[in-house]
Image (cartoon, rainbow, N blue to C red):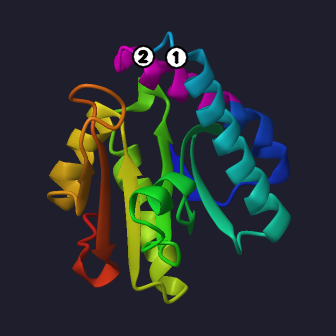
Amino acid sequence: MTMKITRPKKEDEKEILELFETTIKKAFKDEGIKEDEQGMKEEIVSKKQSLKKDFQTNGRERYFLIAKKDNKIVGTVSFGKSNDLINKITNNEYKDIWELATVYVLPEYQGKSIGKKLFNSIILSMMARGIEEFCLDSGYKKARDHWTKKLGEPTIVEKNYWGKNAHHMIWKRKIEDISIDM
């Protein structure tokens, strides 16, 4: 089973969109918010728009990488300008900071270091573009726990943003402070 991390091609779009649907629905279920159909639809549409932006600008405004295992797309990661929620919470303080985003791995491939390889690859891509810092946000508890373990305490915690004890967290980090584990 070989794995490759590569830029997506237009012919990958349908499979990537299916990956978004699968992983976002699972995240909402795991978070106990699967009944929030509107929020789930908005999240999926947002990811579709990000991918479309990558194809339209050839990666200049939103840059995706995909992980393929035995020719199947199993994960994604991207970077682009910070999202509306980050800008709202930070009063536009982060509006010119690149956001690391769209880190999704199919459930059956999680725990196999695919997300780690995607993260390392996108950091290297950002470095190659001369990007010196990035931000990342999450409202999903499982993801918040993961990013806290990986990046340390968040820079901003918007308490109870999604409801009681459902915080939204934002990390801002310098690329030079990120270690890449191989």
Rendered location of residue 134, percent (x, y): 40, 72
Q: Dot 1 corresponds to which residue?
A: 36
The magenta region covers: 18-32
Where does the image place residue 81, in percent across and percent down from the top left? 58, 69
Residue under the point 23% across and 79% down: 177
Residue at the extreme top: 35
Type of amino acid under label 1? Asp
Residue at 29% across / 73% down in the picture?
A: 173
Question: Which of the 4 quarters of the picture holds residue 178?
Answer: bottom left
What residue is shown at x 44% (from left), y 66% (from top)?
A: 91
On the picture, is 45 further left or further right than 159?
right
Using the numbered discs, state the Cα–Cα distance from disc 2 to disc 1 in whole angstroms.
Answer: 6 Å
Amino acid type, mark 2: Ile
The location of residue 28, given as percent across then percent down, is 45, 21
Is residue 30 in the magenta section? yes
Magenta stretch encompasses residue 171: no
Q: Position of residue 135 (x, y in %)?
A: 39, 66
Between residue 70 and residue 99, name the one nearer to us. 99
Residue 62 position (above or below residue 102): below
Q: Which residue is mark 2?
A: 33
Q: Residues within 10 Å of mark 1 (few under 14, many from 20)?
A: few
Is 175 situated above or below 156?
Answer: below
